Image (cartoon, rainbow, N blue to C red):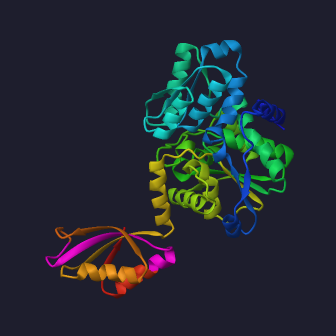
Amino acid sequence: MVFAQVTLDDVVAARELLAGVVVPTPVLRSRILSEIVGGPVHLKCENLQRAGSFKVRGAYVRIAKLTDDDRRRGVVAASAGNHAQGVALASGLVGTRATVYMPEAAPLPKVEATQTYGAEVVLGGESVDVALARAKEHAERTGAVFIHPFDHPDVIAGQGTIGLEIVEQLPEAGTIVLGIGGGGLAAGVALAVKSLRPGVRIVGVQAEQAAAYPASLAMGEPVVVDPSGTMADGIAVGRPGELPFEMIHYLVDSVVTVSEEEISRALVLCVERAKLVVEPAGVVGVAALLAHPHAFEPPVVAVLSGGNIDPLLLSKVLRHGLAAAGRYLTVRIRMSDRPGALARLLGTLGELRANVIDIAHERVNARLHVDEVEVKLQVETRGQAHSDEVLGALGSQGYKVFVG
């Protein structure tokens, strides 16, 4: 199968080039997702790859194929983090210097990891698209070779090696679900898999707040969207790549979107049930399975494309995911300002087996009567049914309860 400048032979050659450089990541069965979907679901764990994501595959193939003169001039790239680390690692292995432009708000662990691998990091701009423009200017100014994160045949071929592994590890796969940012991963995997198993469905997933592909596919050409509204920074790309778009148009069966809440739920599930740390962009395939469990023909493989998440963001997303799952409840309760009232409220919550983890007591507020107080509580529960039970019990006892 041939599309533009990439063929299955290119993917096979990329795999040979990557031998000893990347690890063939495991495909692990998920019991909980299998129960939800109604058939076998497996997780392709690229979050366990070197440098923490699939990006090192494409970056290494691209850089390893440079001429000696190109290597002497060095390379430059732009990334929110994963491509940055992949380029930095690959450059060190090949023996060329790397400069990486990253958005101002790039997660600190990704910045530090990129520097640790030996690259020079330049921060600036609000998005990956701004960083891309700055990296291209750097290439024109210095003669460094620009390593695009997704719109290059060698990069797509490198990412496509994941598809070869999936076909070998789970030849009976019926559907592969994976995230789409610029499109290099989806294009490469779809090319490899469709070339060998044409009947396998490929489903791409984007965050609702950064969904350039549905609009682009509807228009028949890449269009620009604002990608700044999602926590999934690794797929927050405002415009599809030209080459990936062409391939995805023909090879990917459908593209769906997921909300921030669904991403949070998926991340919590991976941490809690699969014992896997995955970043928001890497978990959107699982989010799609949770949002539309009967839309995918099993056996399903969901690609966990990366695990490079800032611990602070992880903490925030876990709280968000717990709230979305009904296990983290924030309520405001108005009640009479009388001795023992707060103790009785806490006693009621204790009897309901709800764990109070934070409390704020407010007496002066324009919303309150003179004899009222408002108590803001953050409460851990055992799930949505338990949260509903807690709210119902508080209401039945006469408390004025406001959620959120």
The correct choice, above or below, for 105 with respect to 178 in the image is above
Vertical side of 127 occupied by 71: above or below:
above
In the foreground, 344 or 132: 344
- The quadrant in which residue 262 appears is bottom right
Closer to us: 385 or 347: 347
Q: Residue at x 70, y 20 (%)?
A: 66
The percent coordinates of residue 317 (x first, y second) are 48, 55
Give the residue drawn at x 65%, y 32%.
151
User: Residue 258 appears at what percent x and percent y?
Assistant: 57, 56
Is residue 378 within the magenta segment?
Answer: yes
Horizontal placement of 74 versus 134: left or right? right
Q: Quadrant for the N terminus, please.
A: top right
Instruction: Determine if the magenta segment contains residue 188.
Output: no
Q: Is residue 196 above or below residue 33?
A: above
Residue drawn at the location 75% of the way across and 39% of the way down: 160
Q: Position of residue 331 (x, y in %)?
A: 35, 71
Total marks shown come to 0
Which region shows up in magenta? 368-388
Q: Is any part of residue 152 visible from this angle?
A: no
The percent coordinates of residue 328 (x first, y second) are 44, 68
Residue 359 drawn above or below residue 316: below
Observer-nearest of 312 and 398: 312
Position of the C terminus, as image quadrant, is bottom left
Say whether residue 296 is left or right of residue 377.
Answer: right
Q: Quadrant of residue 118?
A: top right
Q: Report whether residue 167 is seen.
A: yes
Q: Residue at x 48, y 49 (%)?
A: 311
